[in-house]
């Protein structure tokens, strides 16, 4: 058996349906319930409002923490190491978001946050992060056009002991920053005659080695927004 085949056989399979519980799972709730968020808050007696929370480098009220997260210049999604979608920053209405999400989706297994055709790619990305093969995976949303450059960054999260604790997904349009930079430096974007345009995964052609290593995620636009 080749080393490649051996690695494929022994590689752990990602449970995108979150069928098991982990130490932080809120037990006794149906993950797919549209009221999971409300039920979970009630069952755990979760604090809110002006109650203070001690963080690793600060003390904030829950309200202040929400203000802080909702003011971020990108959309945030938190999925735990059990592949359960637990949080997104509620920064704007779903229809205005790059990857629209709704409170009723919180608690879902991440399998239900992607169309079926994208699950294999999503599992591959999570596994790269879980196994430490990559600390961060970046995906460009195809078909943005010249005025948008929407990126999804998937970042591995770890606890103080280095244990994988889930995925921090950041979604943002890079083009405003590019346009600001060009305006303030007097530079401009020009075509590179030596590069073939890649209209599927990004603005330029990937190297062959990168193509072989990168999982092919069929649908990068849904984020945590897809409902079947």
Image (spheres, helix red, strand yellow):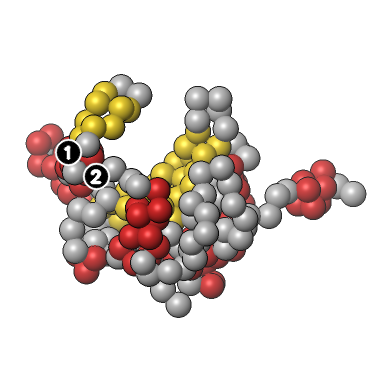
Instruction: Report the residue marked by disc 1.
Output: 50
In the image, what residue occupies the spot 76% across and 51% down? 8
Q: How many marks?
A: 2
Left or right for 148, reference 193: left
SS for callout 2: loop
In the image, what residue occupies the spot 32% across and 28% down? 55
Left or right for 22, reference 139: right
Q: As rendered, which of 166 and 52 lies closer to the eye?
A: 52
Left or right for 215, reference 220: right
| Residue 39 locus on image (x, y percent) | 38, 60
Q: As rendered, which of 26 and 200 lies closer to the eye?
A: 26
Calculate the distance from the C-alpha at mark 1 to the C-alpha at mark 2: 6 Å
SS for callout 1: loop
Q: Is residue 150 above or below residue 81?
A: below
Q: For label 1, count other residues whose C-alpha is less than 10 Å away and answer few (under 14), some (14-19) or many (20+).
A: few
Q: Quadrant of residue 141?
A: bottom left
In the image, what residue occupies the spot 36% across and 66% down? 35
Instruction: Report the residue marked by disc 2.
Output: 48
The answer to whether residue 48 shows anywhere in this view is: yes
Q: Quadrant of residue 199?
A: bottom left
Q: For label 2, count other residues whose C-alpha is less than 10 Å away and answer few (under 14), some (14-19) or many (20+).
A: few
Q: Residue 130 has which mark?
A: none
| Residue 122 locus on image (x, y percent) | 53, 58
Q: As rendered, which of 201 and 36 lies closer to the eye?
A: 36
| Residue 219 locus on image (x, y percent) | 45, 66
Q: As rendered, which of 109 and 33 lies closer to the eye?
A: 33
The answer to whether residue 189 shows anywhere in this view is: no
């Amino acid at each position: 058996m080749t080393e490649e085949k051996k690695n494929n056989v022994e590689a752990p399979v990602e449970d995108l349906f979150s069928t098991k519980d982990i130490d932080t799972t809120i037990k006794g709730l149906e993950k797919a319930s549209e009221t999971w968020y409300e039920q979970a808050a009630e069952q755990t007696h979760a604090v809110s409002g002006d109650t203070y929370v001690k963080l690793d480098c600060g003390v904030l009220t829950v309200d202040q923490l929400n203000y802080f997260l909702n003011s971020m210049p990108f959309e945030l999604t938190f999925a735990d190491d059990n592949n359960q979608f637990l949080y997104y920053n509620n920064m704007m209405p779903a229809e205005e978001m790059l990857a629209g999400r709704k409170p009723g989706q919180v608690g879902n297994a991440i399998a239900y946050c992607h169309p079926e055709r994208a699950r294999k790619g999503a599992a591959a990305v999570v596994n790269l992060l879980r196994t430490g093969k990559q600390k961060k995976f970046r995906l460009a949303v195809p078909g943005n056009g010249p005025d948008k450059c929407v990126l999804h960054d998937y970042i591995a999260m770890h606890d103080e002991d280095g244990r994988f604790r889930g995925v921090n997904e950041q979604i943002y349009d890079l083009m405003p920053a590019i346009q600001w930079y060009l305006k303030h430096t007097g530079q401009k974007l020009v075509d590179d005659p030596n590069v073939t345009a890649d209209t599927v995964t990004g603005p330029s052609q990937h190297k062959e080695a990168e193509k072989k290593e990168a999982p092919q995620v069929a649908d990068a636009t849904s984020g945590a927004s897809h409902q079947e």
